[in-house]
Amino acid sequence: MEEKGTMHVHLLTELTGNLYSEESEWEEEWSESDEYGMPLDGTELADYEEVIREELERYGGEDDLMQYFDGSESIQEKIQSAVVTIENKDGILYGCTKLELNEFLSQEELQEFTEYITGQYSDGWGGEGFEQRDIKVDGGTMNVHFWHPNMEQPKMYEKKTEQIPTKPEKQRPKLQLLGHDGNIFSIMGDASTLLKKNKQTAEAKEMRKRVLESGGDYYKALLIISEYVETELSPPPKENKKTKKKNQPER
């Protein structure tokens, strides 16, 4: 059976918090009692991302919520892990459940699982644990809530692995050996000049070093040079398997 690749999906809900001053300096600016602290939204909490992340790690690291899930078997088969963390997206701090999936969830499965996540945030993992932790910040303490009464449905984002683009390989300059001065140093010098003109100075330096270390073996030195510039001794270029077409049998 062909092995399926792992897919990565993030479920995001904006964090909220309450900041409690040690000196109650907000009474003039804050009309309600300081008992509930100054409310903070995800944009304001982004300024505290580092300290919140540190407290989250102390709380238990990135906790996998699948260990508590007892819902549909199809969801258990599709989700490898559901790890809780935080994510800063466009300057807003979100609570984030990172999913590793064998297969995408159906709409019904996604609805069931987001309800489970919301329940964990409100009464389980978050509500009975993390939001009750007092996080020390400059001037006071802060509580952070993964769940709040006006919380929207978790938003789903597929996280695609970023691929670093590879630089196209430079075409080797051509050097004809036939009729060339047979002196190896002359050949090496001409090859070096061609490489430098082709903006391959590092390759020219490497080639010269290898030739000089070849132990005086003339043919070995020619083969080394032929690795850097295209000569009659260079191996033929590899055929592009994607573009090569097989001869079709006559019908």
Image (tube, rainbow, N blue to C red):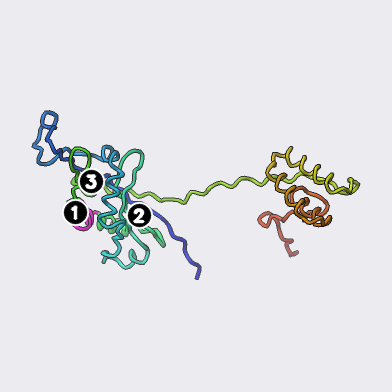
* Location of mark 3 (residue): 151
Label 1 or label 2, whichever comes before in sequence order? 2
Q: How far apart are the alpha carbons under marks 1 and 2?
A: 19 Å
Q: Position of residue 155 (x, y in %)?
A: 32, 48
Single out the residue that lies furthest toward the right.
179
Q: Decide: few, some or many residues near mark 2? Use Cα within 10 Å; few <14, some 14-19, many ≥20.
A: many
Label 3 or label 2, whichever comes before in sequence order? 2
Label 3 or label 1, whichever comes before in sequence order? 1
Residue 156 drawn in magenta: no
Q: Is residue 134 above or below residue 25?
A: below
Q: Quadrant of the C terminus?
A: bottom right
- Tally the marks: 3
- Label 3 or label 1, whichever lies nearer to me, is 1
Q: Position of residue 50 (x, y in %)?
A: 31, 44
Q: Which residues are magenta?
A: 118-130
Residue 127 drawn in magenta: yes
**Which amino acid type is shown beneath numbered disc 3?**
Met
Q: Position of residue 227 (x, y in %)?
A: 75, 52
Question: Residue, x 70% and y 48% (percent of image)?
Answer: 206
Question: Residue, x 47% and y 51% (percent of image)?
Answer: 161
Under tag 2, what secondary structure?
strand
Q: Position of residue 209 (x, y in %)?
A: 73, 49
* Location of mark 2 (residue): 98
Q: Using residue 34 as the reference point, say whether residue 13 is left or right of it.
A: right
* Location of mark 1 (residue): 127
Q: Using residue 172 as the reference point, say whether residue 14 is left or right of it.
A: left
